[in-house]
Structures are given as C-alpha cells and as structure tokens.
Amino acid sequence: MKPIRLDPENVSRILICQLRQIGDVLLSTPSAQLLKQAFPQAEVHVFTEKKCADVLTNNPDIDLIWAVDRSKLTHLGKEIGFYRRVASQGYDLVLDFQQLPRCRWVVAFSRAKVRLTYPPPWYNRWLYTHWRVQDTGYSAMAKASLLKVLGIEWQGEKPQLVLTDKERAEAEGLLQIMGIAPGTRLVTVDPTHRRSARRWPLGHFARFIEMAAQAHPDCRFLVLYGPGEQQDAEAVLAQVPESAKHACLTTEKVLPLRTAAAVIEQADLHLGNCSGPRHLAVAVGTPTLITLGATSWAWTYPGPGHKALSLGLDCQPCNENTCPKADPPPCLDGLAPETVLSEFTGLLDEYGRTNGLGSPRSEKAAWALAGGPEVFSSLVGDSPAE
C-alpha cells in the first residue's frame, strides 16, 4: 500500500472504530494520541460500546465518544439512523480496528477521503480505501502500525486512562475505610476470567497470597472481581489460611470501572490473569505481573515493570477458551505459586512504589478536571454541534 499524504491543515475530524472489549478499547488510546499529535487541529472521535466508554472519559486526545447503547437500538431503523448520524460528521479519516458489522455500517455511510483498516475480506474491500497488514507484537503497537501508511510510528506510547483528583480521592477514602494505612504496600489481585484456559487456578492465588504475606509482611492483597465473579474472589479468600487472612481483603460490591482503575493506581503492583485489569494497570502506571495460559505475549507492554509468566509449553499459546487436555489447563496448573512469588519479589523490590496512599498523578489530570471528551450515546436524540 502506497503512503497516504494528508495535509494536517486539511484534516478536521478523525474517527476511530473500536467497539469492544474494554481492554482492546484501552489499547486503542495510543493510536488516538499519535493521531492527535500528527493532526493537532483535528477532532478525534471514537465509536465504541457504552460499556467501554468510561475508559476513554477525560482522555485529552479524544474529543467525542460515540457510545453504542444496544439496549436502546431496538430495531434496524434506529440502528441505521444512529450509524448515519455518526458517519455524517464530516470525517476526513476513518480508522477501523475491528471491521465488525456496526463499524462497517459507519464506514459505509461515511464519505471520508481515507478509510483505513487491516486487510479486509474481498467482499468488504469496497468499504475501505486503504489497508495494511498489522505488525506483530504488543497489541497497542500492532493497532498503531496501521498508521505507518500515514507516516506515523508507535514510539512506545502506553495506553492511557486519565483519572480525576476526585476519583483518586474516592479511591484513597475507600482504601482507608478498608484499613490500608499509609506506607502499606498494596497489591491488587485479579483471579477471575470467564475463560478457564486463561485463569490461573484459584488455589494457586490463595497459596501465593499465603507465601507472599509471609515474605512481605508489609503487603496487603486486595482481591478484585467483576460482575458475576464475586464467588471466585470469595473462594480465593476462603482458601487462604488463618495465618495470612489479615493480609488479604476484597470489596463488598463490584467496583465501578473507573473506581477500580483508581484503586489499581494506588497499588505498588498488580497481579492477575490476562484480562482487562492488567490493561487498566498499565494505563494508570502500575507495574504488572501476569500469568499466561492460552494467550500470547502480545498483550504485555514491552517495557520495564511489566512481566508475564508462561511455561512455554508446545501448545502455548492456543487462544482457546477451554483446554482440550485437562481442567485446569496444564499450562496454568503447572505454573507454581513459588515461581510467581520469586518474580513478584523481584518486581516489587525494583518497581514497587511503597507509596501507601497518593500515587503519582497523571500529567494530564488538570486537563481531566476541565471536562474531557463529550460522550454522545445512541440513547440521546440530538447530534453534537457541527
């Protein structure tokens, strides 16, 4: 594909299509940052699902969020009307990361001079003007590699989730109520995943907490969970022996997404499976240690303070939801808590902040307090101002 030459002076609006999932939407934020830098006069809009919009709120590189609320798009007419409204904003560039049906509707209705994506199947090629094979490697880098045809290259930009001072204060207050005193080393733990081939055994998490609490008596382990996953968090805590129960805790209710991110920001380190919270941690500047089963290294940020552990079996990565060999999968069951503890200690000693309450603030927090991007949902009747 030949390079695309766009005069920044003539680019007024850009649309990024990334409907889901939460982690993938976060991983698209470096591309938004790069586009904003290359086209500083342009508005950058994102087309995503309502459940993912919160990770984009307050991002200074995003001017407007088109949030699809599927519960409100009750028939095809409403859907098409909303997609037409999105597409009618006069975009000069549309970047489609997914080619999902809803994305294709918007692309089809848009009259953007450049409609960029990865290589589409032959029957969808008419929708796009340009495509490029994504580079292999870290997912955010792979997404951003599509921008190379515009002369834009990823330089290690991390995903961003920009918190406000109010959100940080609420997280600090929550941790104080839970008994996390200043100076305590906080470790957030994510033991859940809806896919068994990506979930380190709950008993391994419990054993790890037991050993880590003994090795690091100044640490406290906050077990996180999402909707419908509280039983897994409780199962981990139930298996922690009495000698270590003082060091582990969980919340009574599921934390809202941005509250969870603010809590993770306060942590010295995040330990968990290959799922959304690991990307939240990277986005708020918290070191991560991740257990890998079916997934690859492509989800791990390639920089200091972020490490993933894999046994490297011949069948890894398989990208399966369940293991055809055994349950729990050998690739995860065989990853001993002792091995994880050794890596944990190294990361904690080198990168842990030991900051108790009040971790480093985002450089863009002041901008976030001013408002951030407008969120336009499909349940709203009027279009944003032209």
Image (cartoon, rainbow, N blue to C red):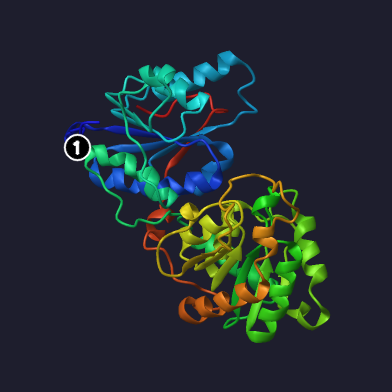
In the displayed structure image, the side of residue 178 where residue 381 appears, left or right: left
What count of labels does the image hold? Answer: 1
* In the foreground, 142 or 92: 142
- Which residue is situated farthest in the top direction here? 77
The image shows residue 322 at horizontal and vertical percentages of 69, 46
Q: Quadrant of residue 36?
A: top left
**Position above or below: 347 against 40:** below
Q: Could you tell me which quadrant the C terminus lies in?
A: top left
In the displayed structure image, the side of residue 35 where residue 369 appears, left or right: right
Seen at 25% across and 44% down, the residue is: 152
Q: Quadrant of residue 126?
A: top left
The image shows residue 127 at horizontal and vertical percentages of 38, 20
Dot 1 amino acid type: Pro
Q: Residues within 10 Å of mark 1 (few under 14, many from 20)?
A: few
* In the foreground, 148 or 363: 148
The image shows residue 347 at horizontal and vertical percentages of 51, 76
**Position above or below: 1 against 155:** above
Q: Could you tell me which quadrant the N terminus lies in?
A: top left
Residue at label 1?
A: 8
Q: Quadrant of residue 145?
A: top left
The image shows residue 121 at horizontal and vertical percentages of 43, 23
* Helix, strand or loop under label 1: helix
Q: Is residue 59 in view from this perspective?
A: no
- Which residue is situated farthest in the front direction here? 314
Seen at 42% across and 29% down, the residue is: 384
Q: Is residue 36 in view from this perspective?
A: yes
**Position above or below: 49 against 183:** above
**Position above or below: 95 against 289:** above
